[in-house]
Image: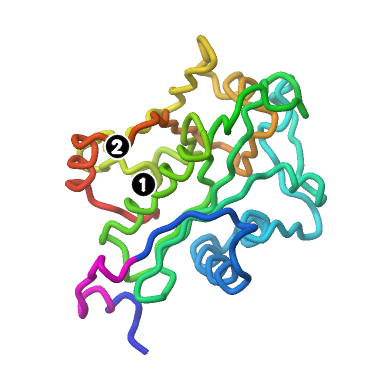
Amino acid sequence: GEEAGEWGTQQPYDQAFEEVRVEWCDALDASLLEAASDLLKARFRSNKALVDLLVKKKVRKGAHTNYCANPTDPSAKGTLESASDVAQLHLALGLVTYKGELVGAAAINLVPACKPARRGAMPTTGGFWCASVLLKAVKPGFEGRGVARRLRRANEAFARAQGAGRMVVPTSGSSRGWWTGTSSRTGEELGGFTESQGFDSLESLPRHRELEFRQLPAAFFLPFDGVTLFVKPLPSTALDAGEEQGEEQGEEQGEE
């Protein structure tokens, strides 16, 4: 077959053949879960066990570290290591197919709206506190065609429909453009995300990373160390025209 990298130069991309959707993982059939797993594993080769957890709720031998598991002791690390631990995760997948082929995927954890200081507390309000996008990939040869942008919009629409108050993306500063829709050329916040801000349900959120994590809901799962949280409040209405116009002018770039 043709090299994936040559595909985009030989054929135009017609959005009429594209389908973008977000579904709860439990509602997807095994073949689609497997395709999403393969795409994400090809992108995150060193995090295959995490892909299995977020896509199939499968826990391998050992445990997954949660770097903000203890809200009263930010230096402590928690773990996810059993079926009961995984049951607390509300997992969804954002999917982009083109002519029947899966070309984009995003793994999302929706965090219940629990009080931050009490682990195991029941939700105090309806819906979810946030939707956290933990993994995202676009198939080689399909970058630069708006796939990741449209996938992000679908993720946000799904999260809003579930009552989530915000999107949260943990990432490093060098790759934030890929995750948040920020133009690396202009620094323009095209995606509406801000760094370590937007926690509007918590007053005077400390900027120090460890103190910030202390404020997060007990069910928040952070499998990465040394990252910054980028946050976007989710209004009940769709993206405004100005933001959409700005996004159209940005370039999608893969994470290095």
Label 1 sits on residue: 153
For image coordinates 74% across by 34% down, the residue present is 77
Secondary element at image label 2? loop
Image: 217 above or below 175: above
Quarter of the figure with the C terminus:
bottom left
Q: Nearer the viewer, residue 73 or 131?
A: 131
Give the left or right position of residue 255, taking residue 214 as reference: left
For image coordinates 53% across by 60% down, the residue present is 44
Q: Nearer the viewer, residue 64 or 132?
A: 132
Image: 47 above or below 64: below
Residue 85 location, x and y as percent?
A: 78, 44
Q: CA distance from mark 2 to mark 1?
A: 8 Å
Q: Nearer the viewer, residue 191 or 226?
A: 191
Q: Of callouts 2 and 1, which one flags the residue occurring earlier in the amino acid sequence? A: 1
Q: Amino acid at mark 1?
A: Arg
**Residue 19 part of the magenta-drawn span:** no
Residue 192 location, x and y as percent?
A: 33, 33
For image coordinates 61% across by 20% down, the residue present is 215
Quarter of the figure with the N terminus:
bottom left
Q: Amino acid at mark 2?
A: Leu
| Segment colored magenta | 7-18
**Residue 8 part of the magenta-drawn span:** yes
Tags 2 and 1 touching, CB below 8 Å: yes
Label annotation for residue 239:
2
